[in-house]
Image (spheres, helix red, strand yellow):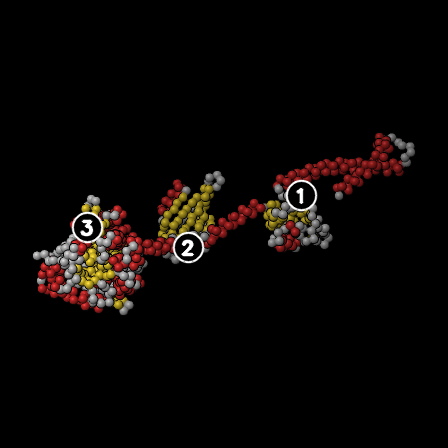
Amino acid sequence: MIRQTIKKTSIMMLLYSVLSAPLQALNSGQQLAFLDPVWAGICLTFFLITSYLLVINTKLKKAQSILQLSEQRLKSTVEGSGDTLWDWNIATGEVVRINDKYMLHKSMSGHFIPNANRIHPQDLPLVEKLLKQHFSEKSAFFEASYRLKDNLEQYHWVLDRGKIIEKDNNLNPVRMTGTVRDISHLKSTEERLNLFAKCVESLTDAIAIYDDKFRLVDLNPSYLVLFGGNRANYVGKPFNLPGYDERYINQVITSLKETEHWQEELRLRNHKDTLLPIEVTIDEIKNSHGQVTNYVVVYSDLTERKKAESQLHNLSNRDRTTGLPNRNLFFTNLKKLAQQDTHHALLVFDLDNFKKINDSLGHQLGDSLLAKLAMRLNKLARQKDTFYRLGGDEFALVMTGTNDIHTITRTAKLFLAAIATPFKMANHELVITSSVGIVLFPEDGATPEILLKNADTAMYHAKQRGNHYLFFNDSMNEQAVKRLQIENLMRFGLKEDHFVVYYQPKMDIKTGRLVGMEALVRFITPKKGIISPGIFIPIAEETGQIIEIGEVVLDKACKDVKRWIDQGLFDGRVAVNLSAKQFSLPDLTTRIDIILQKNQLPSYFLELEITEGTIMDDPQEAISIMRSLSARGIHLAIDDFGTGYSSLAYLKQFPLNTLKVDKAFVDDMSSERGRNMVDSIVTIAHNLDLHVVAEGVEKAEQLSALEQLNCQTIQGYFYSKPLCAADFTSFLRAQKQRESHSQPKLKVVN
């Protein structure tokens, strides 16, 4: 309209210039001869109109200048804001954009929505819905957030706002304008905030947010689950801790303001009025100026964690088989008791030969037996005493607040009697015994470790008596120290080859010829000298070192015998003792085979001596092992016959070659009863077709009596003491020389 007005004004200006001369004359009052009054009137009218138009033209130019300035300012403002202005001709579909950062410029669209192909397919239905709502006057403005693709095929989140500004005569929209703003960064922030909000809402911990005056602003659903009620019950209320008074609350707030953080485990009541262990954590929230704006309080219910900790504590401090406190808790509690200025007693005991039950009846039944035993004994303990399982078949009773000997011994006797009472399990009646070692605190030790060590020492000595209890004393400790020294010496001796083999001859009683010898171990240390077999062998049996010692003896004996055979000095058998622990090895025969092969010694020259007690522990298993050894050509001898509890029914099944009469029976031959005992043993051996060897022969009378009883071979000091390998070599040479001179049979020396 403004442009049309300006165009008309320009035409009038042209006419004005044509008539300017006459009009000027007219204006000056001059009379024109060629103008009639009518024409003069027309010219005057035209002049007046033209003057008016000139005034209007001047004003329009000024308005146009102001409009251009306004448009420039608007354009600068739009460019500065970063928004895109759009003008949509709805009838034609043409869209004009100003400050178009998406480089869409003018666009036409066959879709109801301009540039629909640029809108993300997932967002298009919502944009269309909102636009239709505005067209139907259901909303004052059109406003939609959606993803818009630029010319680089990258999507941006935008906020599109617009309004219909023109309608036709039928009130149909014909023009709409609006703005598009890039809100990608706002959307990212919004998504991040939504994520945090969802996290807070989904947390199982209760969270409450307070303002700087400690009035509640907001809370999460878990808060209501924990404390009950609804949000309206709490918003605007001051900070509190259910069950704690205002003075404590003020202390918390004061501490928080000083440290900016407060944390404590409290007992708070939940919505069911149940006291729960809850960890309360409070932190300050500050703005960019460092001013506190809010406080965040987190309530963590520790009930499940406490249960888990309790279960974990039980797992680490309770024995799973018996349910008793275990070794770990034993030391923990004993350390606490040791810090008290009171008297206590510690009873430690284990079960005699419990391993046999496990091996013969199975570990499951063994565990059941331990569980029943624990229940039985736990009932006998005083209420203030604690019963522990230290491991395996070892138990301990800690009697607190007493060193009364009568009370302690009565308890020990009760325990021993209860243990010895038979257990009926799985169609078996099991009878077990025990040994108890007793120590007193602080008399026998100031620490749990020393007390347990001394109690074990006392128990070890009690075990030698069988089904007995003993109090610890200094002499036991001295013996324990000596025992430990022997263990260490044996360990060192095995490394440094301090175990030496001596040989004692076995002589044919009728011919006086050497028929064999027994290999005997000697422990010779550089500093302590010779340590008696009676001292170190029992300890080696207990520690298991006897297995390695036994193999050393067997290896050295085979090596020496092979050398003597090769030298033509010997053609008999060497007897080597086989310990109980060696005999129970699952790979015993393989071990022996390896040693024989290593020394290239035929098995014919080897005889193994096995004690009566060893083979009677498990006769059926013993028969199987002995048959395996016998099948290899190894001779077998039963040692110490008559000192144990042999069964003749089993004895005849053993694949034996030799029976040895123990020295104890030989020494007792001076009496008629003793002589009859040896006579019976020899008779049994002959009836079983076994060769008889009498050991420990020291006197001529013994030799004479044994010859009369038809004993075939003797061994003992009467003929020779055990000799080292070098001395035995000399003995063999002398024996060989004697045989070459056809020396008659051994003469009895009176």
Identify the residue under disc 2. Answer: 226
Judge depth for marks 3 and 1 and give the one in front.
Answer: 3
On screen, residue 78 above or below 351: above
On screen, residue 190 above or below 610: above
Q: Within 10 Å of the Cα at label 3, are there few (<14), some (14-19), or many (20+) other Cα atoms?
A: few
* Secondary structure category for the residue under label 3: helix
What is the CA distance from the residue labelled 3 to the residue labelled 1?
125 Å
Q: Pinpoint residue 361: horizontal percent, then vertical percent.
A: 29, 64
Residue farthest to the front? 741
Q: What kind of residue is marked 2?
A: Leu
What is the CA distance from the residue labelled 2 to the residue labelled 3?
96 Å
Decide which of 16, 335 is in the foreground and name it.
Answer: 335
Q: What kind of residue is marked 3?
A: Ser
Q: What kind of residue is marked 1?
A: Ile
Residue farthest to the right? 34
Q: Residue at x 78, y 36 (%)?
A: 54
Identify the residue under disc 3. Answer: 730
Decide which of 215, 515 is in the foreground and name it.
Answer: 515
The reply to whether residue 442 is visible in this rendering is no
* Secondary structure category for the residue under label 2: helix
Whether pointer 3 and pointer 1 mark residues with C-beta atoms closer than 8 Å, the reply is no
Q: Residue at x 25, y 65 (%)?
A: 655
Q: Residue at x 60, y 50 (%)?
A: 146
Mark with earlier residue (1, 2): 1
Identify the residue under disc 1. Answer: 98
